[in-house]
Image (cartoon, helix red, strand yellow):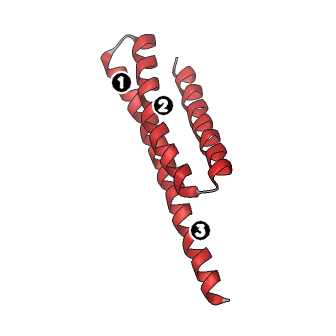
Amino acid sequence: MDRFFIILMVLFIIIANMIAFIAYRKKNNLYVSAFILLLLAVFFGAIGGTLAIMVIRDPFALFYGMQIGYFLLINSVIVLMLAILATVIKKFNSNKM
């Protein structure tokens, strides 16, 4: 049973990153992409928790959804840090020339 949830967790992370990448390609803005990942962390956390409650039939399975949300939240923070770093580098290079 735990293999199913690990595969589901990895699948949610991959899907969230693909949606954020598509949003980045459309808007060409890393901050929008990080915000979309933040929203998807909440959304996929709720879906994972609900799915875990339905499969396991235990109220404590809700914490599984919180774990998915936590991993996606860390993912969105990493993307936000990269966006800030890219902005700083871009400003530094534009001032240098």
Q: Which residue is mark 1?
A: 62
Camera-side mark, 3 or 1: 3
Residue 5: horizontal and vertical position, in percent?
52, 24
Check if mark 1's residue and mark 2's residue have beta carbons within 8 Å.
no
Q: Which residue is mark 2?
A: 44
Callout 3 environment at 10 Å: few (<14), some (14 to 19), or many (20+)?
few
* Alpha carbons under labels 3 and 1: distance apart: 36 Å
Of the numbered discs 1 and 2, the one sitting upstream in the chain is 2
Q: Is residue 7 left or right of residue 46?
A: right
Q: Residue at x 45, y 12 (%)?
A: 55
Of the numbered discs 3 and 1, the one sitting upstream in the chain is 1
Q: In the image, what residue type sits under mark 3?
A: Ala
Q: Is residue 95 above or below residue 54?
A: below
Q: Residue at x 55, y 74 (%)?
A: 88
Q: Is residue 51 above or below residue 72?
A: above
Q: In the image, what residue type sits under mark 1?
A: Leu
Camera-side mark, 1 or 2: 2
* Alpha carbons under labels 1 and 2: distance apart: 12 Å
Q: Residue at x 48, y 31 (%)?
A: 44
Q: Secondary structure at mark 2?
A: helix
Q: Nearer the viewer, residue 84 or 54?
A: 84
Q: Which residue is mark 3?
A: 86
